Image (tube, helix red, strand yellow):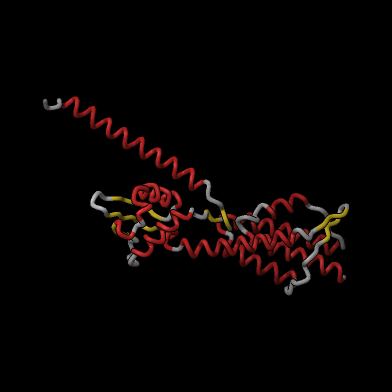
Amino acid sequence: MAKSNLEKAIEKQQREAKKMAEQEARRQRASIIVNGQPLIGGMRIMDSAAEEILQIILSQYNGSENREVRGNYDVIPNAYHNALQLEFEKLSMYGVITSPHIWIHGMWDATLTPQGITYFEDKKSAQEREKEAKKAAINIGNITTNGSNIFFGDVTNSSFSIDNSISNIEKEIAEKGGDDAEELKAILDEVKELIENIDDSRHIPKNKGLFQKITGHLDKHGWFYAEIVGLLGTAAIQLLGG
């Protein structure tokens, strides 16, 4: 017996509801994985499965201006065939691809974002920033306090005058500060004022508020943290020499 139009409409609605539920479950799972990945040097590092799929997409990219990439399942490892929609969902959330599609006849396509094209280079740079941040953390570990004064260790390698150091930091803020440039510049101005006070008073006063502002940028701007520690160290060394 042929199905009535009402029965067909109900079945269609049920299929669509099931499809939407599956999509939502996939988004939730992808979101949990993506948000669970670490931030290194201010950058979200992708999970290994997502990186593997991105490498495959990049291997199929021909350099076109529209950044569209198309391939078939032959280039995808078998282990990912049933999970490719999830991997594409994650890559979209990471911001490295847009408009992914998986076609019934074994084809897929997606559009790389500029961040997707440079992801692995950006990851390497982020890891370098993380190393700088950790190195700066080691330096700050040599700062000790005694009463109202602060004493710096491991600062004897500075080869720039304070003026030159400040000028260099200002240039780096302009180049690397991004959305935080104004805040970093304000912190640098506070440090400059502190150094002037050090020069006038011949001692280094505590400044917990400034210390917190500087360390607040350790994860994202490790270079700034390291530069400020070096700048204050130079001021401390000049104080010892004076």
Is 39 drawn above or below residue 26 in the view shown? Answer: below
Q: Which of 176 and 19 lies nearest the eye of the viewer?
A: 19
Residue 194 locus on image (x, y percent): 78, 59
* For residue 230, side relative to residue 73 (left or right): right
| Quadrant hosting residue 177 | bottom right
**How many numbered discs?**
0
| Quadrant hosting residue 76 | bottom left
Residue at image point 61% right, 66% down? 172
Residue 81 locus on image (x, y percent): 34, 51
Considering every residue shown, the one lying at the far front of the view is 78
Q: For the C terminus, which image quadrant?
A: bottom right
Residue at image point 78% right, 70% down? 156
Residue 181 locus on image (x, y percent): 60, 58
Residue 238 locus on image (x, y percent): 82, 69
Q: Which of 147 and 106 lies nearest the eye of the viewer?
A: 106
Q: Which of 140 and 21 lies nearest the eye of the viewer?
A: 21
Residue at image point 36% right, 35% down? 21
Q: Which of 171 and 215 lies nearest the eye of the viewer?
A: 215
Is 118 drawn above or below residue 16 in the view shown? Answer: below
Is 21 drawn above or below residue 90 in the view shown? Answer: above
Considering every residue shown, the one lying at the far bottom of the view is 159
Q: For the N terminus, which image quadrant?
A: top left
Is 21 drawn above or below residue 213 in the view shown? Answer: above
